[in-house]
Image: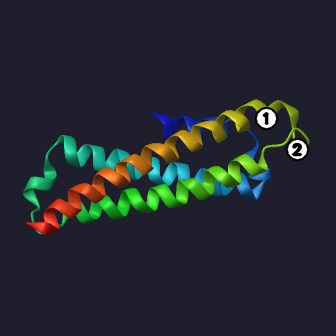
Amino acid sequence: VLGLLVWTLIAGTEYFLYPAFGWVMFVAVFYWVLTVFFLIIYMTMTYTRIPQVPWTMVGLCFNGSAFVLYLIAAIVDASSVTKDLDNHNYNSWAASSFFAFVVTSCYAGNTYFSFISWRSRTLQ
C-alpha cells in the first residue's frame, strides 16, 4: 500500500518533465509489481510446489535490492523536491518523498528478517 502511494503521488503530476522523478517512478512501480507477485506466490503457497528454488535466498536478494534501490530513489526524490520547480506539484512530491522513506524502512526490516531466515536455513 505504501509503495502504491509513492508512485501514485508522483504519477498524478508532470513527473516526466524531471528525469529524477522518472527514476523514482521506475523503482516504485517495479518493486510494487514484484511485491504483489511475491505476495501472491506466498498467499497461494506456490513456493511449496517449487522446492528447487531457494526461497529464503530469493527473499533476501529481493528485499536487499529493494532496500538499496528504494533508499537511492527516496534520496533522489527528497533532493528533487523544491518549490522552485512547480508549486502545484510540491505537496505531492513532498508526500511521495516521505512515503518513499517509509517504504525504505519497511524493506530494511524485511531484509533483516529475510537475513535471519536465510541464516537459520544455512546453519541447519
Q: In the rendering, at what x and y percent does residue 45 appear? A: 13, 46
Q: Residue furthest front?
A: 123
Give the left or right position of residue 25, taking residue 92 as reference: left
Residue under the image location 46 percent in, 52 percent down: 31
Residue under the image location 52 percent in, 49 percent down: 29
Label 1: state its secondary structure.
helix
Assign the N terminus to one quadrant of the image. top left
**Would you name the residue on which mark 2 appears?**
85
Give the left or right position of residue 26, taking residue 20 as reference: left
Q: Residues within 10 Å of mark 2 (few under 14, many from 20)?
A: few
Distance between mark 1 and mark 2 Cα atoms: 8 Å
Above or below: residue 58 compared with residue 37:
below
Give the left or right position of residue 45, taking residue 84 as reference: left
The quarter of the displayed image where residue 117 is located: bottom left
Going by the numbered disc 2, the residue's amino acid type is Leu
Q: Residue furthest right?
A: 84
Total labels: the figure holds 2
Residue under the image location 72 percent in, 38 percent down: 93
Assign the C terminus to one quadrant of the image. bottom left
Q: How is the image coloured?
A: rainbow
Label 2: state its secondary structure.
loop
Q: Tags 1 and 2 in contact by the CB under 8 Å rule?
A: yes
Give the left or right position of residue 113, taking residue 68 as reference: left
Q: In the rendering, at what x and y percent does residue 86 appear? A: 87, 39
Q: Which residue is nearer to you in this view: 104 or 93?
A: 104
Going by the numbered disc 1, the residue's amino acid type is Asn
Q: In the rendering, at what x and y percent does residue 21 appear? A: 70, 51
Above or below: residue 45 compared with residue 64:
above
**Would you name the residue on which mark 1 appears?**
89
